[in-house]
Image (spheres, rainbow, N blue to C red):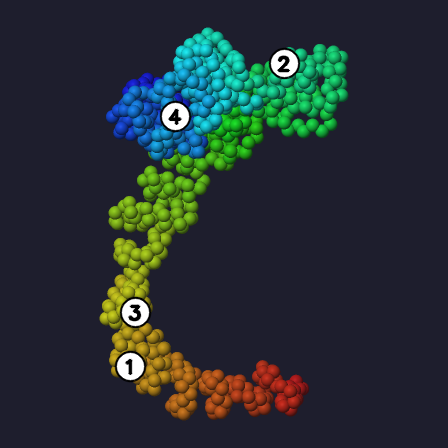
Amino acid sequence: MPLASLLWKSGPVVSLGWSAEEELLCVQEDGAVLVYGLHGDFRRHFSMGNEVLQNRVLDARIFHTEFGSGVAILTGAHRFTLSANVGDLKLRRMPEVPGLQSAPSCWTALCQDRVAHILLAVGPDLYLLDHAACSAVTPPGLAPGVSSFLQMAVSFTYRHLALFTDTGYIWMGTASLKEKLCEFNCNIRAPPKQMVWCSRPRSKERAVVVAWERRLMVVGDASESIQFVLDEDSYLVPELDGVRIFSRSTHEFLHEVPVASEEIFKIASMAPGALLLEAQKEYEKESQKADEYLREIQELGQLTQAVQQCIEAAGHEHQPDMQKSLLRAASFGKCFLDRFPPDSFVHMCQDLRVLNAVRDYHIGIPLTYSQYKQLTIQVLLDRLVLRRLYPLAIQICEYLRLPEVQGVSRILAHWACYKVQQKDVSDEDVARAINQKLGDTPGVSYSDIAARAYGCGRTELAIKLLEYEPRSGEQVPLLLKMKRSKLALSKAIESGDTDLVFTVLLHLKNELNRGDFFMTLRNQPMALSLYRQFCKHQELETLKDLYNQDDNHQELGSFHIRASYAAEERIEGRVAALQTAADAFYKAKNEFAAKATEDQMRLLRLQRRLEDELGGQFLDLSLHDTVTTLILGGHNKRAEQLARDFRIPDKRLWWLKLTALADLEDWEELEKFSKSKKSPIGYLPFVEICMKQHNKYEAKKYASRVGPEQKVKALLLVGDVAQAADVAIEHRNEAELSLVLSHCTGATDGATADKIQRARAQAQKK
């Protein structure tokens, strides 16, 4: 089934080959390597270096290692250059071979100890090139008389090497050339067209397939060979468990017959699997021989083995009819077993359905069972996706019940990425088709599909696809990459993720000029608020510019007040900043804030004057603390003048002076102060402050001056419970009586408590 064709318009091609990722590598004569996809789409190109360009390419090999697919080049200067992995191109120029004046008779790439080498033959000599040196090597046990090596082949696993000599001998040994395995004389001296290894997983024996024009020979440890006559010119491809033989009209697979198949199908076989297959056939004919075969197997105790043989043999068959026959035999045998685990039978049925589907000539992936198990279902699905066989891949996922994220979702995502590349369909139609097919399928990222669309130059389609992406965190980075920053800002704000909004804001700030950036913020209140918060901590000047542009005088005034304390150390600078703040508050028609700011300016000037005249620390104290500091320093008149200047209420001033004098324990000055005029705060605070300083003597002086309504409380504070009781009884106040009673303790206050109780009783009688 043809996948693609393309018209070649580049330079002469020296070699073609497939990479492990199923990309076509085309090595040109000028050293350029062009890489194409399965459908003929150009992927990329790379060069093998200037030396290769100057000397041209004589020959090339494409090989595979555990790191990926590599390319080895032989130049016109008879030097080798290679890269072990074309996906991560690192060119290595191999050492020069001494005396090499012409192209080697044969050469190949080897991989030993995770390093790629070149093995080449020059006449009767072999040379091994690594990254550091050129070493002459000699195959052990080689038959004498060899004057030239005509062909060499390395095994699929790079463990074994075969050499074809001009004497017609085939030497087989380890790839390290340290051990000889065997040698075979094919009696043909003509150079073979191809020579490859044929892996034999079952017997672990060695086998080499040699091809001449219309002749195929299989040689190994045995003294005789197997020969086939070919109807057409053919090409050999070594694989994991055999060799594929391609011609213009046929495709054949040469491999070792599996043990189970040999046991069942060899002539006159009495193996358990063969007998079970015959029993099932006779059962379908309704013959009593079925019972005889079955009894024979059961008597030998080999029924379980027979079922297993039939299941295993079915896996290695390519014809569905024979697969069904063997599986029916296995199912028939299982009926007579009590405890046969069904897993192997079920899994084989599933595997064969998958294999038969991909082996169909419309699909064209003729995997063997061994290759399928080695490849894994995930890699097979990847290959179907690569061929754009999405429906089949989805059917396989659903049949095998694979998790959606590994199966259907992943394939639908690949389908969507392919869909966006169809430029003959409108953006609207493509976006609608993708959404209808994918919906809310778990594991599918619309942002990844949109990124593919953007990579194909379809920006509008990418934006439409991002509308279906539920995660804003996935939308925004791609929108920024597409230079749709304003849309990205809207999406970030809708998400409510402040970190995402900050990311977009910083991107916008670097992308736009200052004016456009501020205008964009004005249209997004949330973004503007967040940016202001950012500027408060990081960029104060930008914050001031924002307030100026918005004529936000209130915030501008607050900004200058903060700046006066944060940035300015000189008093003149701070006063100037506060004056600017006051002007801004007046513009904002906030007279209270303006007046308060002016008062603060007056206070700062006064505090500086006080420091100059009195010494000490006054700057940055509050008005109350300044008054208190003056009182504590004994500057009562200055404190009173400051209170008058700033219109501190009498009550507040008395409290400040009372507290300060008590802290100084200047009881004489406190008494003078209390008698200076009638206290606006009463005399209970004097009692409380004195008791707080543990001075009951002074407290009692003021207790007698406390008004009647607070007399009881004052007396209790100084510990005069008896007098407090007399006052409470006199006032006939139940609350005061209860308060005094609560302070009566033990025998000391027993008489007082009785007195209160009698007063209560008399009051109740009346």
Q: Is residue 552 above or below residue 109?
A: below
Distance CA(mark 1)–CA(mark 3): 25 Å
Q: Amino acid at mark 3?
A: Thr
Q: Nearer the viewer, residue 225 or 478?
A: 225
Foreground pick, 498 / 552: 498
Of residue 55 and residue 386, the one placed in the foreground of this image is 55
Q: Please identify the quarter of the rendering in which residue 266 is found.
A: top right
In the rendered image, which quarter contains the C terminus?
Answer: bottom right
Looking at the image, do the residues carrying marks 3 and 4 touch, with CB atoms under 8 Å apart? no
* Closer to us: 262 or 12: 262
Real-space Cα separation, disc 2 to disc 3, in angstroms: 109 Å
Q: Earlier in the sequence, mark 2 or mark 1?
A: 2
- Going 74% across and 18% down the picture, which residue do you hit? 296
Q: Secondary structure at mark 1?
A: loop
Which residue matches tag 4?
119
Compared with 415, 215 (above or below) is above
Task: Report helix, strand or loop for mark 3.
Answer: helix
Location of residue 189 in the rendering, given as x and y in whole percent from the top left corner? 41, 12
Q: Nearer the viewer, mark 4 or mark 1?
A: 4
Describe the element under mark 2 as helix, strand or loop: loop
Residue 582, visible in the rendered structure: no
Q: Earlier in the sequence, mark 2 or mark 3?
A: 2
Regarding mark 4 in the picture, which secondary structure is present there?
strand
Q: Where is residue 657 drawn, in percent x and y?
A: 39, 84
Residue type at the position of mark 2 = Lys
Residue at which label 1 appears:
615
Q: CA distance from mark 2 to mark 1?
A: 118 Å
Q: How far apart are labels 3 and 4 at the CA level?
A: 90 Å
**Mark 2: few/some/many CA within 10 Å (<14, 14-19, 20+):** few
Q: Amino acid at mark 4?
A: Leu
